[in-house]
Amino acid sequence: MIGLRVSSFVHARERAHLRIYGSITSAQTEKTFASHGGSQTTDDLETIKHSLLKLQSGSDIRGQFVDHETDPLTLECVADAIHHRPKGSPAPLTPLAAYCFGYSFAKHIAGSNPGKVPTICVGRDPRSHGLKLAEYFCKGAKDFGAVVKNTGIATTPSMFEFCR
């Protein structure tokens, strides 16, 4: 199991309103794939959307890393990776999911600070898949228009100090 902690220096009450089901919509996912020229079947989109909703665990995002093809990035390859997991596996945390969370998080921060370009600091742990998840989270945030500072491997306390 891995966790991707989403936090920012916004008031705790505002952070509590960040809900995956409220900020990740099928339209946003379609926009993501339209820019990559991917397949857009309804079943694949529903599979991905459903898997994204399963990742929320309180204020964290929790799941098991599931890799998928990213060149080219298609709905079909992501949905296939999700379907080919063993039955009873934890929620799948894919590079696409990280992209959507980066985009949605940047959108949330921008909404909390109208007129300002959001700046997001991203750190990761040393597990090998952390690099890919951080890369796609950063891509999503940048595609929204955020400034992203990727610190590489970092502890939670060091990220807190970095962001002060």
Image (cartoon, helix red, strand yellow):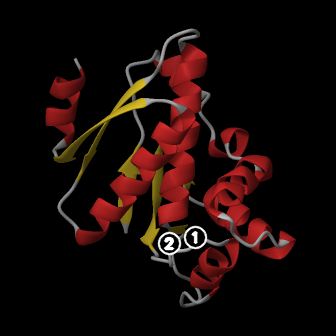
- Marker count (numbered): 2
Which residue occupies 35% across, 53% down? 134
Q: Are marks 2 and 1 in contact (CB under 8 Å)?
A: yes
Q: CA distance from mark 2 to mark 1?
A: 4 Å
Quadrant location of the C terminus? top left
On screen, residue 79 versus residue 164, left or right, reads right
- SS type, badge 2: loop
On screen, residue 43 versus residue 86, left or right, reads right
Which residue occupies 64% across, 66% down? 51
Above or below — where is 66 with respect to 57? below
Question: Residue 144, position in %: x, y?
Answer: 56, 35
Determine which quarter of the picture holds residue 46: bottom right
Check disc 1: other Cα within 10 Å, few if <14, some if 14-19, many if 20+: some
Name the kind of residue labelled 2 in the image: Thr
Above or below — where is 55 with respect to 60? below
Disc number placed over residue 70 in the picture, else none: 2
Of 143 and 125, nearer the camera is 143
Q: Is residue 58 visible?
A: no
- SS type, badge 1: loop
On screen, residue 9 versus residue 107, left or right, reads left
Tag 1 residue: 73
Name the kind of residue labelled 1 in the image: Leu
Of 98 and 135, nearer the camera is 135
